[in-house]
Amino acid sequence: MLKSIGSKIWAIPGGHVPLLSSGEEPRDTSCDELCVLNAGHFDAHLQLTIYYEDREPVGPYPLTVAAQRVRHVRFNDLIDPQALPLDTAYAALIIADHPVVVQFSRRDTSQAANAIATTLAFAG
Amino acid sequence: MSMRDHRGLIDYDAARSQATVGAGTVLHDLGPILHGIGMSMQNLGDVDTQTIAGVIGTGTHGSGRKLQNISATLIGVRAVTGSGEIVEWSIEKEPELIDAARVSMGLLGIFTAVRLQLEPRYRLRRREHCTRTEACLAHLHELAEAHRNFDFYWYPRRDEVKLRTLNPPEAPPPELPYARCIHDQEGFSHEIIARERQLKFEELEYFVPAEAGPACFREVRRRILERHRKHVGWRVLYRLIAADEGFLSPVHDRDSVAISVHQNASLPYQEYFDDIEPILRAHAGRPHWGKKHSLHGAALAALYPRWNDFMTLRRRLDPQGVFLTAPMARLLREE
């Protein structure tokens, strides 16, 4: 039986939610999205800290991913402790209490020709 | 001044579903107290951390097309007036005084006990659905008619809504085929109407005539999408409140829709609220007394047909202006 996979620390340096969207929302809303896999047998409690170019970090943003589940979270939707500004460079540091796997995706629908980019986050 | 010693049940009339409680009783405590004598409040707002006198004094409300705000359930009060006199008013003997007292912001006296019209305790089923904004607006009338409690959140960074409904479990309304259910829960009303809120926020809320609600919301939505999405992630809340007769009640004499916009307390909000408030005012909106707005004196007086009646009563009950604090004097332009 697989006991655990992933890491407890992840970093995403290249965050930037596009301001504009085209197409039908919420399906086509421009967004940065976190995908977290928790293949373990315990709920994983994550704490996100958001870093900016010109101001102090903000956080923690609490997230829970149930055991043996995957969860998708749009950075656009985070409001606790405060909403991220769109069209602003940021980075995210994620610390979990159990190993998880973190993938980061950006959907940019600013123009009708949509663009999607995705990458595994950097595991610490 | 502390109302800590004015809490709890004083007496009740089970046959009429009425109870008198200390004015400093917190709603979160009041629910179980009333439950213990077989009663419940007709409705609650989104949170239950306020005192009963506070929600009555500010016109606090929940949501439901046929449900009035909490102050409309006030049917009797014991108060200390500005001259130090202890008075008792009742809906049977002094209906005008009760209508004035219902949303009086502490200006008529210090309430020490309130008598409430309640209901036999009851259970509700809470269901929450997500759907596209246009689907919600297309079904808005039937949603308001079909559900005991109905409101919706609109999420500006998804252009999506969450429909929130509460109904008697034994009388379920029709399913919502255009929406996906994300929450289903049943319990006694005091356990299930209010939600727990930890995150601090700023809020601007106006009550517009019910018939103006959809158009007003569409304009607010359009403005947020055009100008404010970069900095605003918080939802907009759309609620329904039935008319009442409170002199200064924001739903005085008209069924209303309450539209509120929010921002994290740690982020700037003034520019956002300043831009949205004229839209709400243009639809004949009246501001919530307990939330952010920019109106004073004459601008407020013009919104309330019984403004002068209230102020005449205020001066009679409090000739020295004991309860007319500096902030209230600035708000009302009273001396």
Image (cartoon, coloured by chain):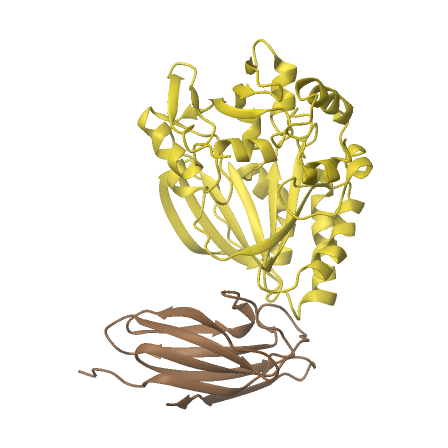
Chain colours: A brown, B yellow
Q: Is residue B47 above or below residue B17?
A: below
Residue B271, quarter of picture: bottom right
Residue found farthest to the top? B93
- Would you say B91 lies left or right of A64 here? right
**Image x and y of residue B264, in percent:** 57, 61
- Residue sitting at 61 percent across and 65 percent down? B267
Q: Is residue B282 above or below residue B110?
A: below
Residue B209 visible in the shown view: no
- Would you say A61 lies left or right of B104 here? left
- Would you say A87 lies left or right of B55 here? right
Q: How many marks?
A: 0
Residue B167 visible in the shown view: yes
Foreground pick, B215 / B245 = B245
Foreground pick, B178 / B332 = B332
**Image quarter of the N terminus of chain A:** bottom left
Q: Is residue A88 above or below residue B102?
A: below
- Residue sitting at 48 percent across and 30 percent down? B42
Residue found farthest to the left? A1
**Image x and y of residue B209, in percent:** 72, 38
**Image x and y of residue A81, in percent:** 50, 66
Residue B270, quarter of picture: bottom right
- Would you say A117 lies left or right of A62 here? right
**Image quarter of the C terminus of chain A:** bottom left
**Image x and y of residue B123, in percent:** 37, 35
- Residue sitting at 57 percent across and 33 percent down? B69
- Residue sitting at 70 percent across and 21 percent down? B319
